[in-house]
Image (spheres, helix red, strand yellow):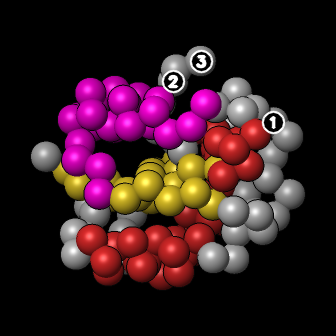
Amino acid sequence: MKKVAIVGCGAYMESGYGCPGEWRCMKAAALGTGKFEGPSQLTAFIACECPGRTTAPNLGMAIKLSEIRPDVIHLSSCMVNAKPACPYVSPVELASILEAKTGIPVILGTHEYH
């Protein structure tokens, strides 16, 4: 079973802009649906907080404190498909930053639930 970490948009989760929180991402990971290749073990869930400067350090700390290195990182569907888009960083740019800082591949998206 793959170990995964998920980075979600804190503004979407806290404000309810079409995302009631992390349950959709967690469901997709557990069932192996959406962007997950099979049922996965969720090892970390990090909320990206505007303007996103602390996302990479917070993810690194979560990995360090849990002592479980994920096989892959997913950017949540609310981050990848946000309308309006994040004014601070594009999903592709954030994925590149996280991959560079952690050495772990990043996948854009988590689920297809509406």
Q: Is residue 32 left or right of residue 73?
A: left
Amino acid of disc 2: Glu
Q: Name the residue that disc number 1 marks.
A: 83
* Residue at left offset 79%, top offset 53%: 86
* Residue at left offset 46%, top offset 71%: 59
Q: Is residue 72 left or right of residue 21?
A: left
Q: Which residues are magenta?
A: 20-43
SS of the residue at dot 2? loop
SS of the residue at dot 3? loop
Q: Name the residue that disc number 2 marks.
A: 112
Place of residue 68 in the rendered image (x, y in percent of width and height, measured from the top left): 22, 69
Q: Do the numbered discs 3 and 1 sit on residues whose CB atoms are within 8 Å?
A: no
Place of residue 24 in the rendered image (x, y in percent of width and height, measured from the top left): 47, 30
Q: Name the residue that disc number 3 marks.
A: 114
Place of residue 41 in the rendered image (x, y in percent of width and height, measured from the top left): 22, 47
Q: Nearer the viewer, mark 2 or mark 3?
A: 3
The reply to whether residue 75 is in sight is yes
Amino acid of disc 3: His
Report the residue that reaches farthest toward the front.
Answer: 14
**24 vs 83, nearest the viewer:** 24
* Residue at left offset 61%, top offset 31%: 20
Task: Tell which circle, 1 or 2, labels the residue nearer the N-terminal end.
Answer: 1
Is residue 26 located in the magenta-colored stretch of the structure?
A: yes
Task: Tell which circle, 3 or 1, labels the residue nearer the N-terminal end.
Answer: 1
**93 vs 83, nearest the viewer:** 83
